[in-house]
Each structure stands twice: as C-alpha cells, then as structure tokens.
C-alpha cells in the first residue's frame, strides 16, 4: 500500500502543482460567468430598430403591433406563473423587456424611395431620435403579399412577428366572415377536455404523495443523467493525463527507475488513483462553484431552494447512488486501464494522436445512447446497449430511475466486473510490454496474434 501511495502522491502532486492545471480549472467557471454576463448584456443592450409598413391604410401595421403586444403579455404571464410556482406568491412579475422594434411612418412610398433609408444613407425620425430604417414592409399591388425588405438578412425576429400577425389577421377575418367572434378559437380551446398528467402509485403511496406529477418525480432522471454525463466527462478528461503522462515517462526512461522500486500492479494502481484524484479535484471545485451559485441564486429568487431539494434527495437515494457508484468506479477503471495500456505503446505525441480517433468514436457511442435514453429509456437500443460492458457504466445509471428488473442489474454488474478484470489482466501485459520491453503500437497486433495462437494451440 505504501508503494501505491508514493506513486499516487508523486503523480497527483505533479499535476496539481502546475499552474496550467489551476488556470484550466478556473477557466470553466470564469468562462461560464463571462458567457452568461455577456449574453445578458447582449440581450439588454440590443439596439432599438425602426421599421415601417407601406400600405394604403394601417391594417397590417396595427396587426404587427398587436402581435408584439400579445407576445409581451404572454411573456409576462409566463414570468408570473413561474414565480408563483417557485413560491413567490402574488408578487408581480418583472418589468417587460423593452420592445426592440418600433414602427415609424414611411418616409417614402416605394422601394426606390426607401432604399437610402434601408442602406443607412439617410435617417428617419422616431421616438429615440433619428435612425436608419432596419426594415420595411411593402404591400403588393394585388394585396396578396407583404414584402419584407432589409439589409440585415440574419435577424428574422421582425419577419417572424409579421408572419404570425398576418396569420392571426387572416383567422380573425375568416371568423368574422363566418359570423363568429374573434376569440371563438380561444373559447373552443378553453372548452376542450383537459389532459392533466398523473402518476400511478400504490394505494398507500398515493394517499401519502398524491398523484400529481411534481419536480420530485422528474428529479431522479435528471440526477441519473448528470451522473452518467459526469462519468463520461471524467473518462474523457483522463485521456490527456494518462496518454500524455505515460508517453513522457516512456520517452524519458522513467519506467525503468520506477519499476526497480515498485511492482507493476502497484505502479498502475497508483497512477489510476492519481488521475482519478486529479479529475475528482476538478469536478469537486466545479461542483462547489455550482453549489455556491445555487445558494446565491436561492437568496435572490424566492423558492429556488425548494427546486434544488428534490435533486439532492434523488442524488442521495440508494436506488440511484449505489448502482451509480459501482458503475462509476468500474467504468473509470476499465477506460483508465485501456488508455494507460495504449499510452505505454507510444513514443511520440503523433503516435498518440493516431489512437485518439478510435478512442473518441468509442466514447461518443455511449453518449449517443445517453441521448436516446433521455428520450425513451425503454428503447430496445438502450436495453441492448446496456448489455455491452463498455457502455454499461453509463447506461445502467440512466435506467435506475425506471426500476429495471433486479436480476438484470445484478447480471450487468457482474459482466462489468468480469470485463474490468479481463481488461486489467490484458492491460498489465500490454503495459509491461510497452513500459519495460519497449514494445510499440505495431507490436500490439503481433501480441494479440500470439495470444490467440497460443489459445488455439
């Protein structure tokens, strides 16, 4: 154990003492803060743009303005509903966002006359002073098309609002022609049979918890997904440390010195624990950052703490925690051993890069299955992929909130254990061949042929 500890301490301190490690560690929360602040600033600082509608009257201009007002009312209602759901009581929602598109009278009646204003060569007067025209709507002579003209083809918000306004206007006119009120469709929708969501439980559980679907019912799925992604992220992170660290020690002949003092299994165990501790340090710091942000958010937003509690409860559930930890440990050991064994066969970074492509494909396959599992946990693809030992660590965690059969969980854990032991046995042989005997990538194929040949014999 002492030798394992010495190898662990040597590698762990070698990583965490580097300035680059702490800079990369601080970069993630810093970029998140900068990105969220920048996005909020970009939304709030977006300029107000002028547009105009060229038509004989004001029908279409009023329809577009009414559509903006409807969207603003819907946004305010959603904010109020979210605050009430989060426990904010009857507090009013925040002020509506400033409207970013303002209608102004047309400075000209045709496209040629509007061209200087749309190209920024001339300005029009408006509520915020003179500005160039951002866009102009021109009604065709036959009245069937409201052409949208603008120099900026990337911002389509105004055009989408106009499209929705035209559809709403056409519906209103059709209802009026049929002798129906403008709110006839809304009234019909309100009279439709409601389809509330209920969760079936046992009689005892239903008397205690009711049948309403709450955040506590959905939290286990999100927690399991976070654990699966966390494992995937850790495995993805160890590629750089294990491959590059092993290449450096092989090229500098450090293996010869280490193996004079420790045995091969102790060396591998110490290195795995060191990289695990490094990635755990990174995740712990990011986790503390997330918890601190959540605590800060709960002080600013009433009811935010009540939203966090179901997730903490789900994370502490033995049904998710125990299989999650078992899958986490076995998955980490399996992939860690694979990367260490492959790294021991490389002399240069270029050789390691040839191994990254198949490793990336191998890692992306369970990520695709994770996406499918979120949409449909009972998908046959997920059921079959869970029986593949290299995918089991990720997918078994995701299946736990849906109460899979106990025998499947036990058998799949057994397959993971058997695969982990087989990978351990093979990785030690490959690692010894690469670290001690100087074998390269080309020798791996001959090694496999030799092993298969001996078995056949």
Image: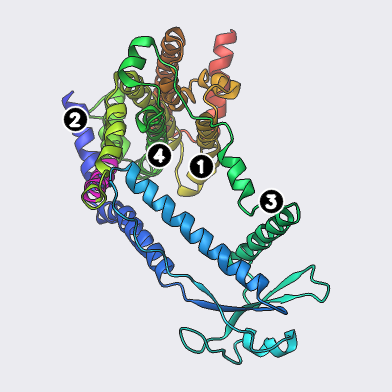
For the question of whether residue 123 can be seen, the reply is yes
Picture coordinates of residue 169, whole percent (x, y): 67, 61
Q: Tell me if residue 295 is in the magenta stretch.
A: yes
Circles 4 and 3 in contact, beta carbons < 8 Å: no
- Snapshot quadrant of residue 384: top right
Cα separation, mark 4 vs mark 3, equals 58 Å
Could you say whether the residue bearing mark 1 is in a helix, strand or loop?
A: helix
Disc 3 residue crowd, few under 14, some 14–19, many 20+, Cα 10 Å: few
Q: Tell me if residue 134 is in the magenta stretch.
A: no
Choose between 112 and 433: the one closer to the eye: 112
Could you say whether the residue bearing mark 3 is in a helix, strand or loop?
A: loop
Asked if residue 8 is positioned above or below residue 106 in the image, the reply reads above
Cα separation, mark 2 vs mark 4, equals 25 Å
Cα separation, mark 3 vs mark 2, equals 81 Å
Residue 233 is tagged as 4
Q: Nearer the viewer, mark 2 or mark 4?
A: 4
**Label located before the other in sequence (3 or 1):** 3
Picture coordinates of residue 198, whole percent (x, y): 46, 24
Residue 180 is tagged as 3
């Amino acid at each position: 154990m002492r030798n394992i500890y010495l190898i662990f301490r040597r590698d762990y301190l070698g990583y965490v003492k580097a300035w680059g490690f702490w800079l990369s560690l601080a970069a993630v929360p810093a970029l998140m803060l900068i990105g969220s602040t920048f996005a909020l600033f970009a939304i709030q600082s977006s300029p107000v743009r002028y547009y105009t509608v060229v038509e004989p009257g004001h029908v279409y201009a009023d329809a577009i303005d009414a559509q903006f007002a409807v969207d603003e009312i819907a946004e305010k209602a959603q904010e109020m509903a979210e605050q009430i759901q989060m426990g904010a009581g009857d507090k009013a929602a925040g002020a509506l966002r400033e409207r970013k598109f303002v209608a102004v009278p047309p400075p000209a009646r045709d496209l040629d006359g509007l061209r200087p204003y749309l190209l920024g060569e001339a300005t029009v007067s408006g509520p915020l002073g003179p500005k160039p025209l951002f866009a102009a709507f021109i009604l065709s002579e036959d009245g069937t098309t409201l052409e949208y003209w603008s120099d900026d083809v990337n911002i389509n918000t105004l055009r989408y609002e106009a499209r929705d306004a035209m559809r709403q206007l056409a519906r209103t006119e059709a209802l009026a022609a049929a002798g129906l009120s403008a709110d006839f469709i809304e009234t019909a929708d309100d009279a439709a049979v409601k389809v509330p969501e209920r969760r079936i439980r046992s009689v005892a559980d239903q008397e205690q918890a009711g049948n309403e679907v709450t955040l506590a019912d959905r939290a286990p799925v999100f927690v399991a997904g976070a654990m699966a992604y966390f494992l995937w992220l850790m495995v993805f992170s160890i590629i750089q440390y294990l491959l590059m660290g092993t290449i450096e020690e092989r090229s500098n002949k450090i293996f010869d010195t280490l193996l004079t003092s420790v045995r091969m299994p102790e060396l591998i165990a110490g290195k795995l624990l060191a990289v695990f501790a490094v990635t755990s340090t990174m995740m712990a710091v990011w986790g503390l950052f997330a918890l601190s942000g959540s605590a800060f958010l709960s002080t600013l937003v009433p009811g935010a703490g009540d939203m966090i509690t179901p997730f903490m409860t789900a994370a502490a559930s033995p049904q998710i925690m125990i299989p999650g930890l078992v899958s986490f440990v076995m998955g980490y050991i399996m992939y860690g051993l694979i990367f260490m064994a492959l790294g021991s066969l490389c002399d240069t970074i270029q050789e390691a890069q040839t191994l990254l492509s198949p490793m990336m494909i191998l890692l992306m396959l369970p990520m695709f299955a994770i996406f499918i599992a979120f949409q449909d946990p009972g998908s046959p693809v997920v059921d079959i992929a869970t029986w593949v030992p290299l995918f089991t660590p990720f997918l078994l965690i995701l299946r736990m909130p849906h109460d899979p059969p106990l025998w499947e969980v036990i058998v799949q854990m057994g397959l993971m254990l058997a695969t982990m032991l087989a990978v351990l046995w093979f990785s030690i042989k490959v690692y010894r061949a690469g670290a001690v005997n100087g074998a390269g990538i080309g020798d791996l194929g001959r090694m496999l042929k030799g092993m298969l040949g001996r078995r056949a014999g």
